[in-house]
Image: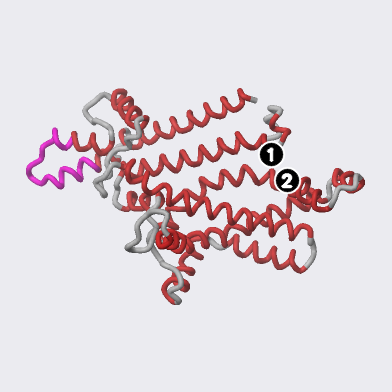
Amino acid sequence: MQSRYIERFAQAILTIFLVASLAFGMIRLLPGGPMDYLKAQLIQQQGSNVDMVRINRMVSTYTNVNPKEPVLDQYISYMTSLAQGDLGQSIWFNKPVSEILIHALPWTLFIMSVSIILSFAIGITLGALMAYGEGSRLDYVGSVISIFLNSVPYYVLALVLVYFLGYQFHWLPTGGRMANGTNAGLNWPFIAGVFSHATLPIMSLVITGFGGWALNMRGNSIQELGADYLRVARLRGLSSRSIALEYVGRNAILPMYTGLLINIGFLFGGSVILEQIFKYPGVGYYLFKSISSRDYPLMMGAFLVITIAVVIGVYIADLTYGLIDPRVGGGDSETY
């Protein structure tokens, strides 16, 4: 059991290491890549007074890579800087990349975690009700609504919500993370502003996301309801509530658990468009800005953060899956 956790941890570290190495390759080795473009930008800014020593020093500062060093030394310096939390200097914002992402990450985690929890809770509740009322009007209407909403891209709904609830009715703010003039802290104006600014992004993800969970939960629950062990449970005199929660609900959720944590990575990637629509300065917002402005250090830093979020999500799924499914606790990887 313990060796499985250590093995998974080593795999997670190896994945992050490989992604960081890939980022280095994209910065340094690709022909006509980011370093050449960055050097050309700096030379253009210098005009006729081009000082290549200074240009190379600035490139080294921005990317953590000294173009005059051998490739192996560049790689070691780059990985050492990453291990120390130094992701380079943003060209566009003229700030350390780590400082920008540290301030942006909590806001992205906030809207993504609330969206995942709400969409999952609504989805499994609706799916369980549909399964227990299979063939009823609730099942029919719930299935139609779930299929329709699940087929709508979140960014399309986001634009619709911004237009109607933001610009037409002025019920909710259309951009930013908090109300102007409020101070961050445990005070009501700040907290109310944070939730009101996050409402539209969260609504976009929850409304278009719970349908998929509901359909999965409905299918899994119907499969469990036809299992033989439930007849044995009823013959033993167990209450309907115990059967629904401890047998049907638990076994129906198990196949969805890993997908839930992997979905964290998907939502981090989706935050690029969502945060741009709502002008919400999170990791996705800065990643979009870095791509449009060719701010490669910031782009690579945001890319690394999103990758690490995916790896951590999968690793947590590995660690906790055995706690809710005893078959995995015995070390039988095939059941996982």
Place residue 46 in its image quadrant. top left
Q: Which residue lies furthest to the front in this view?
A: 187
Quadrant (top left/top right/bottom left/bottom right) for the C terminus: top right
Q: Residue furthest right?
A: 235
Q: Where is residue 252 in the image (x, y as percent from the top left)?
A: 73, 48
Identity of the residue drawn at 69% across and 30% down = 329
Q: Position of residue 32 (x, y in %)?
A: 28, 40
Q: Amino acid type of disc 1?
A: Ile
Return the residue at label 2.
Answer: 250
Identity of the residue drawn at 73% across and 56% down = 128
Inspect the magenta stretch and tell me whether residue 73 lies in it.
no
- Which structural element holds mark 1? helix
Inspect the magenta stretch and tell me whether residue 49 lies in it.
yes
Identity of the residue drawn at 41% across and 67% down = 173
Classify mark 2: residues with Cα within 10 Å, few (<14), some (14-19) or many (20+). some
Q: Disc 2 vs disc 1: Cβ atoms closer than 8 Å?
A: yes
Give the magenta part as a residue range: 38-56
- Which structural element holds mark 2? helix
Return the residue at label 1.
Answer: 324
Q: In this view, does 24 lie to the left or right of 233?
A: left
Q: Magenta segment, principal secondary structure?
A: helix
Q: Which of 79 and 117 is in front in this view?
A: 117
Q: Position of residue 219 (x, y in %)?
A: 73, 53
